[in-house]
Amino acid sequence: MEQTLVLIKPDALQRGLSGTIIARLESRGLKLVALKLMQVGSDLALQHYGEHAEKSFFKGLVKFITSSPIIAMVLEGNEAVAIVRSSMGETNPKNADPGTIRGDFALDMGRNLIHGSDSIDSARKEIALFFADTEILNYQRGTDPWITEL
Ligand code: DAT
Ligand code: MG
């Protein structure tokens, strides 16, 4: 089953939106298979956002993600990568549809609440950056057959 990395960013934690964000993703049917509260250090931030190293906003992005704790989680489900991205909404909250997390709760590109892997390949790499294999659990929910037609 497909897995994706989600980060609830410092702004969401500071604003008390963690529960709301987790609830939205859980309600959609995605299964939580790993979760932790953590402080991102600069090494991890540089690795995670390495693809943006040359961008003008990179310094601010690293400062922001390391500024206060985050929640990291791994969510599992059929097409979990695309499902999370559609629930998040566009990167710039101005363009995010109402009904999405960014479209309902964010205003600013640099304070857009949530990260979700953008492909299966980046999900695999990002999950390995944030979690040890032993932290990712394999379990069944009684509701699984009511969420996914097997
Ligand atoms: P996403 O988080 O939707 O995958 P991304 O990978 O392109 O978006 O960028 C990572 C983060 O960097 C994004 O969530 C917010 C920030 N960011 C991206 N483009 C930006 C810009 N033009 N100005 C300021 N911050 C930006
Ligand atoms: Mg991205």
Image: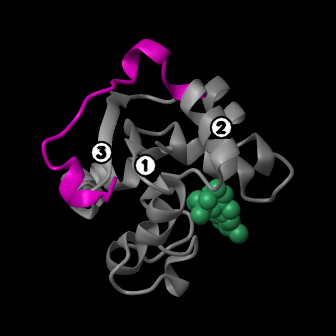
Q: Is residue 110 left or right of residue 27?
A: right
Residue range in magenta is 129-150
As shown in the figure, which amino acid type bears the numbered disc 2?
Answer: His
Q: Is mark 1 within 8 Å of ligand 1?
A: yes
The residues bearing labels 2 and 3 have C-alpha atoms spaced at a distance of 23 Å
As shown in the figure, which amino acid type bears the numbered disc 1?
Answer: Lys
Residue that label 1 marks = 9
Residue plotted at (58% across, 70% down): 91
Q: Residue furthest right?
A: 54
Residue that label 2 marks = 48
Q: Secondary structure under badge 1?
A: loop
Tell me if mark 1 has few (under 14), some (14-19) or many (20+) residues whose alpha carbon lies within 10 angstroms of its own. many
Residue that label 3 marks = 31
Q: Which comes sooner in the sequence, label 1 or label 3?
A: 1
The residues bearing labels 1 and 3 have C-alpha atoms spaced at a distance of 20 Å
Residue 50 picture quarter:
top right
Q: Which comes sooner in the sequence, label 1 or label 2?
A: 1
Image location of residue 29, percent across then percent down = 27, 57
Image location of residue 48, percent across then percent down = 65, 37
Label 1–label 2 contact, CB within 8 A: no
Q: Is mark 2 within 8 Å of ligand 2?
A: no
Mark in front: 2 vs 3: 3
Tell me if mark 2 has few (under 14), some (14-19) or many (20+) residues whose alpha carbon lies within 10 angstroms of its own. some
Image location of residue 44, percent across then percent down = 62, 27
Q: Is residue 149 visible?
A: yes
